[in-house]
Image (cartoon, rainbow, N blue to C red):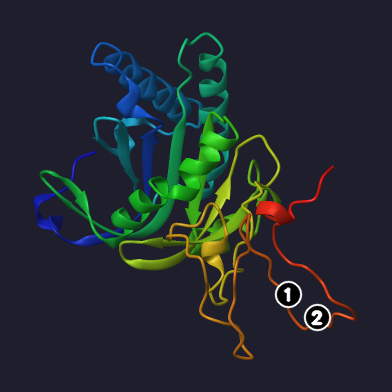
Amino acid sequence: MEHDALDAGEARYELVISVDARGSGQYSDAEKPLMRRQIYEVLETAFAQAGVGRNAVHLEDRGDGVLISVPGRIAVARLLGLWMTELHEKLRLDNRRERRPLGLRVAMHVGPVRHDSEGICGDAVNLACGLADSSVARHLLEREQADLVLAVSESLYREVVAPGGKFIDPDRFAPARITLKGGEVTAWFQLPGRPAPALGKQTAPGTSPATASESPTADSEDHEDGDGDADGRADYRAGRDMNVFRDTTFERSVHIGHNIGTDRRKD
C-alpha cells in the first residue's frame, strides 16, 4: 500500500494486527523458510476469502511473524469476523498434514499509526505487538494445544466485539488483566472455534488488578504474599506446606502441619 509523501509522519487511525508464530526458536534454520511460507499462505488465503485485497493493507515481515495495518476504509468487523474465521479454517486444515503444526498468536487494536519509508510505528503498534507476545496468549496456545489464539484490546472489544455481528460472538471471549511495558491493560482473548477460554482468577475490567498475580496466566511475577485486602488483613497463597485460616475458632486442640521424626504415626 502506497502512502503520499505529504502524509509521511502523520498519524491515521488504522487497525493494527500483530501475528507471531509459536515456538519459532525451536525451528531449525532449514525449517524456518517452510514456517514462514505457511504463515504467508494462511494470511493471504484469509485475505482473499474475506474480500480484502493484498495490496490494500500494509504488511511488514518480522521474521517469525508479520505486522499488518489496515486502513479505515476497510471495516474492522470484516477482519475480526470473516478474516479470522477464514484464517483459523485454513490453518486448521493445513496443520492436519504438517509434522510440526503451526500455532499463531494474533492480536488486534485500533489506534493512530504513523507510516514512513521503513514501516509503521506508534503506541497502537506497540500495544498490538505486546498483546500478541503476552504470557496469556502464549499460555493459552500451549495449554490448549490450539492452532490459533486471538487477543484484542479493551477498546476494540467494547466498540466492535461486544455488539456482536456475523462471525463475531462476544460470549467466546474472556478478559485478563496483563502487564505490558507501557503498564497494566485489560485484553480479551479467544480461541477461535471454541468456547470462551478459562483464564483462571482474573480481575474484571475496570477493577483493581491486585489479585492478578494469583492467575497462572498473569503477566506479572508470582509472589508468596500479597498487599493485604480492604480491612487490613494480609493476603496469602497457600502452598503445599502452608495452611491459611481466617476468622476460624477451634473448639479443641488441633495439630496443623506435618508429623515428622519420631512423632510420625504408623499406618
Is residue 15 among the parts visible in the rendering? no
Q: Regarding mark 2 in the picture, which secondary structure is present there?
A: loop
Q: Which residue of the protein is positioned furthest toward the right in this rendering?
A: 251
The answer to whether 165 is drawn above or below residue 231 in the figure is: above
What's the distance in space between the residues labelled 2 and 1, CA to CA?
A: 6 Å
Quick one: quadrant of the C terminus? Answer: top right
Task: Give residue 56's quadrant in the image.
Answer: top left
Depth check: give the residue in front, 108 or 239: 239
Residue topped by disc 1: 245
The answer to whether 206 is drawn above or below residue 148 in the figure is: below
Q: Regarding mark 1 in the picture, which secondary structure is present there?
A: loop
Kind of residue at badge 2:
Thr
Kind of residue at badge 1:
Phe
The answer to whether 107 is drawn above or below residue 141 in the figure is: below
Q: Residues within 10 Å of mark 2 (few under 14, many from 20)?
A: few
Picture residue at 51% right of the left edge, 15% below the top = 94
| Residue 222: x %, y % from top left | 47, 60
Residue topped by disc 2: 248
| Residue 63: x %, y % from top left | 24, 30
Is residue 94 among the parts visible in the rendering? yes
Q: Is residue 227 left or right of residue 180?
A: right
Q: Residues within 10 Å of mark 1 (few under 14, many from 20)?
A: few
Q: Is residue 176 left or right of residue 242?
A: left
Depth check: give the residue in front, 217 or 228: 228
Depth check: give the residue in front, 24 or 56: 24
Quick one: quadrant of the N terminus? Answer: top left
Q: Which residue of the protein is positioned furthest toward the bottom in this rendering?
A: 231
* Res 91 label: none
Q: Which residue of the protein is positioned furthest toward the front in this rendering?
A: 262
Disc 2 and disc 1 in contact, CB within 8 angstroms = yes
Picture residue at 10% right of the left edge, 44% below the top = 117
